[in-house]
Amino acid sequence: MQEKSLADINERIRDGSARVVTAEEMPDIVDELGLAGAVREVDVVTTGTFGAMCSSGVFLNLGHSDPPIKISKALLNKVEAYGGVAAVDLFLGATQPSEDRGIEYGGAHVMEDLISGKQIEVDAYGAGTDCYPQMDLQTSLRLEDFNQAIMVNPRNAYQRYNAATNSADRTMHTYMGTLLPRFGNIHYSGSGVLSPLSNDPNFDYIGVGTRIFLAGAQGYVMGSGTQHNPQNNFSTLMVTGDLKKMNNRFLRAATFHKYGPSLYLGIGIPIPILSEKLAKSTAVRDRDITVPIVDYGIARRDRPSLKMVSYEDLKSGMIEINGKEVSTSSLSSFHVAREVALTLKQQVEKGEFLLSSAVEPLSRVGSSRPMKQTKESPNVGDVMSRDVVTVHEDIGVEEAARLIVSGSFDHLPVVSRDGRLMGIITAWDISKAVASGKSSRIGDIMTRRVYSVNADEPIELAARTFDTHSISAMPVVDKDNKVIGMITSNHLSRLFARRR
Amino acid sequence: MKLMLHVAPGIVRYPLIASVILETGALVNIERASIDAVSGEIVLEVPQDKCSMVKEAFERRGVKVVPLEIPVIRDENECVHCGACVSICPTGTFRFEDWLVVADSGKCIQCGACIMGCPQRALKLVLK
């Protein structure tokens, strides 16, 4: 069994004789030389990833003003930073939208502007105390004006990530990008073969204190990240690094349309080949790393997954879903991930980047449980009306008008002979038909593209559908698309009024 | 070759495309048309050999014609080659070439799907 020590490898890095390859090159080396041969020939394997890492932020220390201020709220280029940490420490989160430009400019954009050398405008509001009497101030700062700008990211560098598609009949704008209706496309994220945690899934090297490449700076692993879930191969890292040393080639602000700002971040970890076990884990290929394709058309926490695919399948550009070829594309950049791994390789080769031994290994158990919700909100079935009047498409406009007048809704669901939803007719449709004098059969004037909900869906979903499509009522259907009730915006407003 | 037509409100009601097809005999494919109360935008695919004839025929009818030579304008400093544009393009304009996103000319119909889909806001339509 071939073994090496970290001290040996660092010694070789210092004298410039370390043999370094990227995680993309490693699988072929192991295939050719075997594990023992790979341990002999390779000292370090560099990894890299570059993608949206929403759970990121930076602590900024502004220094004390005269008279002093205890900042309770601060805006940086109109993006709010959290001020509830002492007097002049702020935490700026990457996904916070700005007050003036909304999601087109957010916390991530402030970070990119700062490391690009731009000046930002600060508005600070104070609490007003005997020791910190100042109530508000404005100033203009550049990155060098902050005492410290320390990035602290709660959840970065996901080991792998679910791919996303959309079964619904409308385009969904998500943090996984634009998902076209009826399985129109698939988006994925993560660098697969180059993914740092996929190259060391058992944490044989990566641990608390591991030195990493963080957007061009040398940063550190603080520990496992939030939602760290190694049991299911969804491990994450909490990382830190000095924003002042970062490079805007590897830190880029982004905006996901109708979702919000996010931060694209380049992270790389060099892994020493100390043992055959590490040679084996760094020989991982795209085809070995699998993820589910998840249906974002279902706006619930437990979205159904359609099938398991590998990063090799995802990177091929086409995946079959229900017999149809669906185009795939990535949201993270494999091009820049490669650049991270190559830059790190050069830094190690030049002796500029030494490897570190972990203070403690990462936790091998994690937690990514659903939220405990103590105040359950009602489902559609709890508030809907069950005494819904349905009609068949062959009745006349006059009869439909009579039913609306005598019933409690100004919408009539139109159903087939076996009770399945076919369309909907509103008082407005009837008025239009009467005014134009054209048709007397409601099958000709009904809206066929009808939105509906299920009784076991939360009312928030119904409210969102009303809002998105500017409608005020929807039939409630069972799993066979048979109408069992009706929900209207009145049901929701009554519920809201009672809560107050 | 793709041509983009800007149709003024007054002539929207006139069977423009039909008359140009009859005049030129060109096999024209309408790839996108959006017409509202104030203006119309139509993208046509026209065989290369009849392109200038078709362009001239439309211009004689008061239509502004712009040949779509470059697909979309990309800010190379902003693009990180993620590929978010690749699978949302209805005409397959974008593809990866060794993990760099390249745009093929002659496919774009100026629908704008990629503009909002680009997280880095690196893309712009040629005519907007």
Image (cartoon, coloured by chain):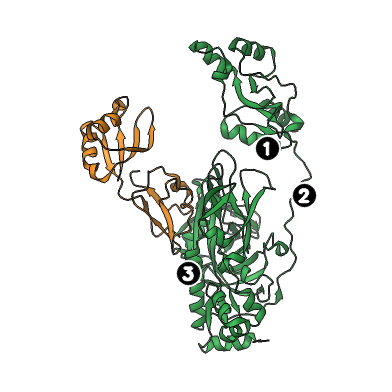
Q: Which of A191 and A480 is in front in this view?
A: A480
Residue A202 percent location from the top left of the image? 69, 72
Q: Residue A490 vs residue B35: left or right?
A: right
Q: What residue type is labelled 1?
A: Glu
Label 1 SS: helix
| Drawing shade for chain A | green
Q: What residue type is labelled 3?
A: Glu
Circle 1 residues within 10 Å: few <14, some 14–19, many ≥20: some
Q: Name the residue that disc number 1 marks.
A: A460
**Circle 2 SS class:** loop
Find the distance from the CA under tag 3 to the CA under tag 1.
43 Å
- Looking at the rendered structure, the kind of residue marked 2 is Lys
Q: Tell me if residue A124 can be seen.
A: no
Q: Quadrant of the C terminus of chain A?
A: top right
The residue positioned farthest toward the right in the image shown: A374
Q: Which of marks 2 and 3 is in front?
A: 3
